[in-house]
Image (cartoon, coloured by chain):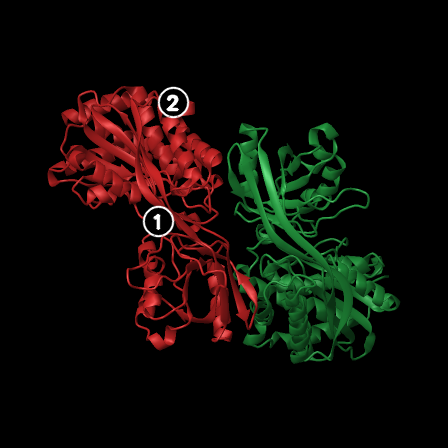
Chain colours: A green, B red
């Protein structure tokens, strides 16, 4: 056992008598408060500002040594009314959602024939005469697994579909929701445009509606649809909310634990990312109750993750000079499932410490994974700049049943799973903050 | 074995070599066609007329001996835009649906404090000063079971809540959805007004929204809400669609099998009652393929069941003189789950025949129930006038997860369960139509 582990073990033995019953559910209670008292908090909106105020006040109440906010500029995209109808031959409405960042249709709407593709790749192989003047429909299904490995394979239709469809002359694009549930909710999320390519409206329909539309197309290949949608974008500001427990011995060395405070507007952002916010806010506060850690624990609640890591980029720019003092960083942003694996991205000399952390976590059913940790979406920005990262991997089997839909609400969180995660976050963060190891090495 | 059973058994032996593979899924295919090509079909709407045309044409195609429609007058209630917001202290929108028949709020909307009750009964015990000028919220949860026994205990808040709240001076009423799912769908359904009591707007919120609102009220008892809703009612017509396989020996004796053709507007009415429509349409057609039954099999697809059995009442009035010739009636209107029990409501001398039918069904996992069969909502109108009824009881454990919500779509139907039901419907209907027993005795 290394010297660092002796210190750590002492701290954890102490922790064994704690936390008090109320503390066991601290992350759960914080998540409840955020989702009930603020609810949806789209970046740049009044509710986003309310979330920033809530988090700032709450972090102060929780006993953090320092709490501050860092403002950044961000577009504030707002969803307006949206309606998608089959106009012939089988008139009916479909359940849709605007994709984040999409332009509207104008008051007159868009009416056109549909053309279906099984994937973004198939669309990219199409000829302009197949697509010009039509509404494109990409009908690619997503399957579920523990690590959400299919998300990356399907989400391209959402992020790049509008550009590829517009290149071929499409008037609008509809995608099958990037989700795994057959509940009739449409899955929103960020889409992008490209300079020089016409901006066309982009929407997602629910999985049952994609099945329905596909059946309609098989009976009536020339089916016509009408899309009406009003969205607006304006300039706004948002904030990263930052709090620290100051290190007792190495206050300039930063262990960064994070989540993102913003959410999509459809649900109350309980799984994405209220639970992550609750977890990291609770972690620092509960560790402080056990005594000051050696290194500084910095909690960062990033703003506007959903709009494209806007807060994370602002953080990286503002803290560029300090990144060498970020000894390790991590984020909780994959729902509220039980943690089952610990991954690191350390230098080779630090790998034995990763193993030691995992051993401390093994009592909670957590195994050792790999040294290719992602760290989390916001943290990936500073990871790319050389900051070592770790990941407490959550079971995300059901995550994409709820993610980015109106169904992402507090009742979907299992308090026992979140309590397990809170324990794991406390153990891992204590170990990282009480260590003196340079994880870059 | 009785003589009737010998005939029946001969027919069923014949049936054993049938149906052809395509026929096994006939109910499923019919349900798919109705829900895809027509979709939602609210009574009195253009889609309702389209459903009537579809059913008429399809029954003719299926080889029924006679097919006709019977027109009746009906109100056509139409849902408009609806929005429900917490305005203080925690601004956010809730997922709601207008209850069927509700008036709107007027353009200015209704803003008021909320007052919560745990049940309709609790509301009825309240004093006017608790309720006057407020928006009432009835937060009664529904639990699930195979027979949906809780529905009747909870649905009173929907049907009578507006009247009871208005008597006490409320401005509007919100109920927790009469449903068993924690998905964020609000459950619509018929509500009623009473002569002499002010008509106030009535809406349901989803189960997660009811949980959220209840949490908000516990933190802020004086929470204020705003409701904006535009609904419209106009005079319209609809139709019962009727088809017969003429009896070979007793053509004037009618075995009535039925479902309802209309649906709520939110889903595509797959479980309620597309599956029932598919089942009874398939049953008559497949029996005819095996040869003409002794008695006439009359398929009735009732119009506007959802608006309050409007088509069923029109049928009972129009066929009053003929009801004594209705030897038995039944309806399929409880989703698409597997059939697990056969119930009758026969005279005492016919009970042994009920047992014989159940024995024929026992190979499909169907047991004998009681002699208190309900028959089905539409059929209950003529049952009250003395027509014997039977019920093939479906497993409705999940029915109220989908019922009256946008999530009632075709993908929720298990084709194997529907094929089992189709077999049971064919066996029972053949037995009833080839019998000469007077079930009233």
- Screen quadrant of the N terminus of chain A: bottom right
Percent position (x, y) of residue B6? Answer: 19, 23
Label 1 element class: loop
- Crowding at dot 2, Cα within 10 Å, few <14 / some 14-19 / many 20+, comes out as few
Q: Label 1, on which residue? A: B146
In this rendering, position of residue B135 left or right of residue B216: left
Label 1 vs label 2: CA separation? 36 Å
Q: Label 2, on which residue? A: B61
Q: Nearer the viewer, residue A341 or A52?
A: A52
Give the residue displayed 71% in from the left and 71% down from the top. Answer: A430
Q: Is B196 drawn above or below residue A191 in the view shown? A: below
- Crowding at dot 1, Cα within 10 Å, few <14 / some 14-19 / many 20+, comes out as some
Residue B342 showing in the rendered view: no
Percent position (x, y) of residue A371? Answer: 77, 54
Give the residue displayed 56% in from the left and 65% down from the top. Answer: B92
Q: Is A113 drawn above or below residue A262 in the view shown? A: above
Q: Nearer the viewer, residue A226 or A390?
A: A226
Q: Is B31 drawn above or below residue A96 in the view shown? A: above
Percent position (x, y) of residue A31? Answer: 59, 67
In this rendering, position of residue A313 left or right of residue A233: right
- Screen quadrant of the C terminus of chain A: bottom right
Label 2 element class: helix
Choose top left, top right, bottom left or bottom right for residue B391: top left
Q: Nearer the viewer, residue B337 or A123?
A: A123
């Amino acid at each position: 056992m290394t010297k660092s582990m002796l210190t750590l073990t002492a701290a954890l033995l102490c922790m064994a008598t704690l936390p008090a019953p109320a503390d066991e559910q601290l992350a759960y209670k914080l998540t409840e408060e955020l989702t009930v008292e603020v609810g949806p908090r789209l970046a740049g909106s009044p509710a986003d500002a309310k979330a920033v105020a809530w988090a700032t006040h709450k972090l102060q109440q929780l006993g953090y040594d320092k709490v501050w906010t860092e403002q950044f500029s961000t577009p504030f995209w707002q969803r307006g009314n949206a309606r998608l109808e089959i106009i012939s031959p089988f008139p009916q409405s479909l359940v849709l959602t605007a994709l984040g960042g999409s332009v509207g249709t104008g008051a007159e709407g868009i009416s056109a024939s549909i053309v279906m593709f099984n994937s973004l790749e198939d669309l990219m192989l199409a000829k302009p005469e197949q697509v010009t003047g039509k509404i494109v429909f990409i009908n690619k299904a997503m399957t579920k697994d523990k690590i959400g490995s299919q998300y990356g394979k399907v989400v391209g239709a959402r992020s790049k579909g509008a550009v590829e469809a517009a290149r071929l002359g499409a008037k609008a694009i509809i995608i099958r929701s990037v989700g795994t549930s057959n509940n009739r909710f449409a899955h929103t999320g960020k889409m992008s445009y490209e300079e020089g390519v016409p901006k066309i409206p982009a929407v997602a329909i629910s999985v049952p509606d994609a099945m329905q539309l596909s059946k309609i197309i098989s009976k009536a290949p020339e089916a016509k649809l009408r899309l009406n949608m009003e969205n607006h974008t304006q300039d706004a500001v948002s904030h990263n909310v930052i709090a620290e427990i100051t290190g007792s011995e190495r206050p300039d060395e930063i262990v960064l634990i994070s989540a993102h405070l913003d959410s999509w507007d459809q649900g109350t952002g309980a799984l994405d990312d209220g639970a992550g916010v609750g977890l990291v806010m609770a972690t620092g506060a509960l560790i402080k109750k056990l005594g000051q850690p050696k290194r500084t624990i910095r909690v960062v609640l990033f703003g506007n993750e959903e709009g494209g890591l806007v807060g994370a980029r602002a953080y990286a720019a503002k803290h560029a000079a300090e990144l060498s003092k970020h000894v390790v960083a991590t984020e909780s942003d994959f729902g509220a499932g039980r943690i089952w694996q610990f991954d690191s991205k350390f230098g080779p000399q630090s790998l034995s410490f990763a193993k030691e952390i995992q051993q401390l976590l093994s009592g909670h059913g957590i195994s050792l994974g790999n040294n290719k940790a992602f760290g989390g979406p916001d943290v990936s920005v500073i990871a790319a700049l050389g900051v070592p990262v770790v990941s407490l991997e959550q079971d995300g089997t059901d995550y994409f049943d709820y993610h980015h839909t109106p169904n992402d609400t507090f009742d979907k969180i299992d308090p026992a799973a979140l309590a397990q995660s809170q324990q794991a976050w406390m153990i891992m963060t204590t170990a990282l903050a009480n260590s003196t190891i340079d994880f870059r090495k």
